Each structure stands twice: as C-alpha cells, then as structure tokens.
Amino acid sequence: MKKSKYNIIFAGTPDFALPAFTLLAKEHNILLALTKEDKAKGRGKKISQSVIKTKALELGIEVFQPKSLKDDSTIDKIKTLNPDFIVVVAYGLIIPLEIIYAAKHACLNIHGSLLPYYRGAAPVQRAIIQGENKTGISIMQLDKGMDTGPVFKTQEISINQDDTAKSILQRLSNLGANLLTQVMDEIFLNKLEPIKQDNTKATYAPKLTKNEVQINWNNESYNITNLIKGAYDNPIAFTYLNNSLVKILKASVTNIKSLKRPGTINGVKKEGMYIASKDFDICVTACQIPGKKPWSNADILNSRFFIESEVFCQKSLFNL
C-alpha cells in the first residue's frame, strides 16, 4: 500500500532544521516554509537568508517570513492552508496556540535532547559543557510551554570524547528527520500516543551568552575542554592574550601536570600550544585571532604571535 502524502507547514531556520525539511519535501507536500527574516551578517553587513529559505526557493516552495506569528492575518493564512501536520524545528519564534491547533493531526517539534532534560535553546551545547556522555532527540507535541509538551518518541546517542556541539547537532539533525517521519506515519494511522513529561526531572538549557564562554584557566582541564567543545561554534569559547581576543576552537586534555600558574603558555610544539590549567596542561590545536582565518596547530607553530607572547604570558598570562 502506497504511503499517503501529508500536507505540511514547516517552520525552521538554522542548519539543524535542513535535513528534516529536505526529507519532508521529498516525501510529502510542504505547503509553506516559515523561517526567520533575512539579516545582516559579518563586518560588511551582507544580507543573509536562512538555509531553509534557500532550499525552499530551490524547490519552488512558498516562503513566509513574518516578524511575529501572533497577528490575525498570519494566523488566518496558516489556518486556511488546513495542514495535516505542522513541523517546527529550531524556528526561533513563539508559536501561538491558534497555530498549534491548526494542524489536523499534530504540531510536532524536533528537540535536541532526551526530554524533560535540557529544555531550551541550547540543549546540545549545555549537555557537552556539563560533561554528559549521552544525549538524543525527542519528537514532541508542541504546546504553550518551552519544550514542555508530551513526547511521542526519543532516540539516544553517545557523546564521544572528540565530539563538539557542531558534530552532535549534525548527527541529531539527521536522526531527528528520520524519527520524525516514523512518528508522523504512526500518528496518521492512530498507532501512537504521546507520553506526558515528568516535570520534576526537567532541566534547562538557555542560549549561551558570551560571558559564559570566556575561559577561566583556573578551572580543571576537563571542564575547560568541555566548554570549548560545547561552545563550538556559536558563540565560541575565547580568552585574551596581551589584550587580544583569541577564540579557542579545538583543545584536548594532556597527561602533563600543570606546574605553572593557570593560563601560562608552557610551549608551542608540533602537536599544538600547551596551556596550564588548575590540574593538567591543555593542548590547543585550533584557534583564531581577530582578522585571521582559523589556525591549525601548524599555523600556531609558525606564528610569531604566540611565540613572541610566550615570555609575557609568564607574567601577565591570559586574562582570567
């Protein structure tokens, strides 16, 4: 028996939403693509559009970019389309109840955690920073709360030692897309009911602020590297060297006991730049300074920026 095609309204903005959008567009009818407004980026303030808008235009799908979903004309537009499902993936705007209830079957959300843990805008980043060894994806029914709706299905994955927020988000976005289509089919056939979340176990994952991702070299090496991995790639963990901001993109804990003051550069070698922490040295293998492209460990080794600064770091160190 041929699977029915669903009429879907999709709301999403960043890369995390793209696999689900692409898969749904291939298998079903996307009536409308909701995405955040275009915005200026970078020093040149060049106008940039979301990946969802780019893909939708490529596929000939109507794009709608309202500032808010709360006005009557927007609500009426969506109601008139009479969708089977509304799918929301990291959209960025609050969805009013009138729109949530406009879906015939369900208004579904793909969330990057094992709910009720890590509700909020940065579940993957926060999980890595907290040193979790697992996370996952949840397909939930949207309601008026922040990730509080009942959950249809979850799927768990491991957080490996070399994972960053970027690598986990890539894995979860693909996993979520496939799990979403399974959930939609089971809902359509009346074979699946959502399970209410246990609010007593809820934890929260608000968006990271720049102040939170400034590295404190007085912390343990494990906590510092978790911050670097979790803050990759927006915002990126950073420190200061001689009043210059340095973004730390990649680093690992060594087995070298730190004998100097935390923040001291202990050497720039072929493997990377060694920096003292509260317990063990951290080896930085990728970083970025203002006005430059990201540097690998080879770039760090060949740069006079760190070599010339090393002696000063014995005194002034990185800002803590």
Image (cartoon, grey):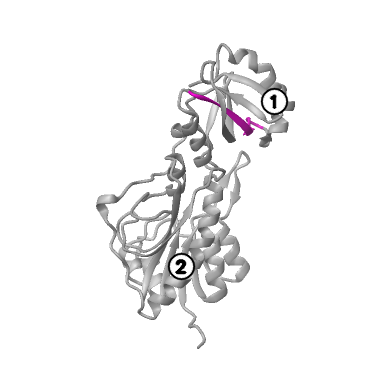
Q: Identify the mark at residue 196; answer none if there is no mark.
A: none
Residue type highlighted by circle 1 = Lys
Determine if residue 79 is in view: yes
Query: In the rendered view, does 267 fall on the left or right side of 66?
Result: right
Residue type highlighted by circle 2 = Leu
Q: Is residue 287 magenta?
A: yes
Residue behind mark 1: 269
Q: Choose between 118 and 122: the one closer to the eye.
A: 118
Q: Choose between 144 and 191: the one closer to the eye.
A: 191
Query: Residue 304 placed where, x, y %?
Result: 72, 21
Seen as rendered, the residue at the extreme top is: 315
Query: Bounds of the magenta span?
Result: 279-291
Residue behind mark 2: 180
Q: Secondary structure at mark 2?
A: helix
Query: In the rendered view, does 204 fall on the left or right side of 252?
Result: left
Query: Residue 59 placed where, x, y %?
Result: 61, 70
C-alpha gap between disc 2 and disc 1 = 47 Å
